Image (cartoon, rainbow, N blue to C red):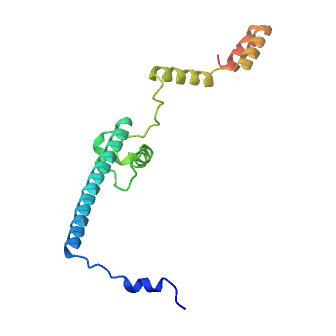
Amino acid sequence: MSNQWDDDDDDYTAPEMSSDLVKQLRKANKQKEKELAELKAQFEGLSKAQRDRVIKDTLAAKGVNTKIAAFIPGDIEASEEAVSKWLTDYSDVFGFESQPQATPNVDPRVAQDFQRMSQAASQGISLDTQQDLQRRLMNASSREELDQIIRESGL
């Protein structure tokens, strides 16, 4: 059984592609490949520059000589966390101690004062102990008993 579309194929003749058109297409393709290669080279250059900048900034923020950047392997991700981890892992090789990073928004003097107060609070006498000591001192009836209380309290 035939349909109406069968007859149309017989009348169609494919136009011959001219060799000039093929040459133009090849030339355009070659031009695009060249542009793509240039863009890839530019992208790789910018990626390397950005990676170097992130690594050097991280090293500088940690107070480490930026020349160490030459020793960081290429497979290390260019992020502050990855560089910090690598730096912590290999700090003994380069002869420095890895220190926890201080909060950048806190004045160093305020941080030092806070640390000093925290140490004093941990080493000092609690309020309950102080009140108990005061009560015992007030209720002491002799000099020997006062000396005993003072020795026990560490005053």
Q: Residue at left 50%, top 24%?
A: 111
Q: Is the C terminus in the top left, top right, bottom left or bottom right quadrant? A: top right
Depth check, front residue: 94 or 123: 94
Residue 147, image quadrant: top right
Residue 28, image quadrant: bottom left
Horizontally, is 38 left or right of 61 in the view? left
Q: Residue at left 36%, top 82%?
A: 12
Residue 107 percent across, percent down from the top left: 46, 22
Depth check, front residue: 110 or 53: 53
Depth check, front residue: 131 or 31: 31
Name above or below for residue 115 compared with residue 30.
above
Residue 104 percent across, percent down from the top left: 45, 29
Depth check, front residue: 129 or 151: 129
Horizontally, is 80 left or right of 71 in the view? right
Q: Residue at left 69%, top 15%?
A: 150
Residue 2 percent across, percent down from the top left: 52, 89
Name above or below for residue 86 compared with residue 2.
above
Horizontally, is 3 left or right of 130 in the view? left
Residue 129 percent across, percent down from the top left: 73, 19
Residue 151, image quadrant: top right
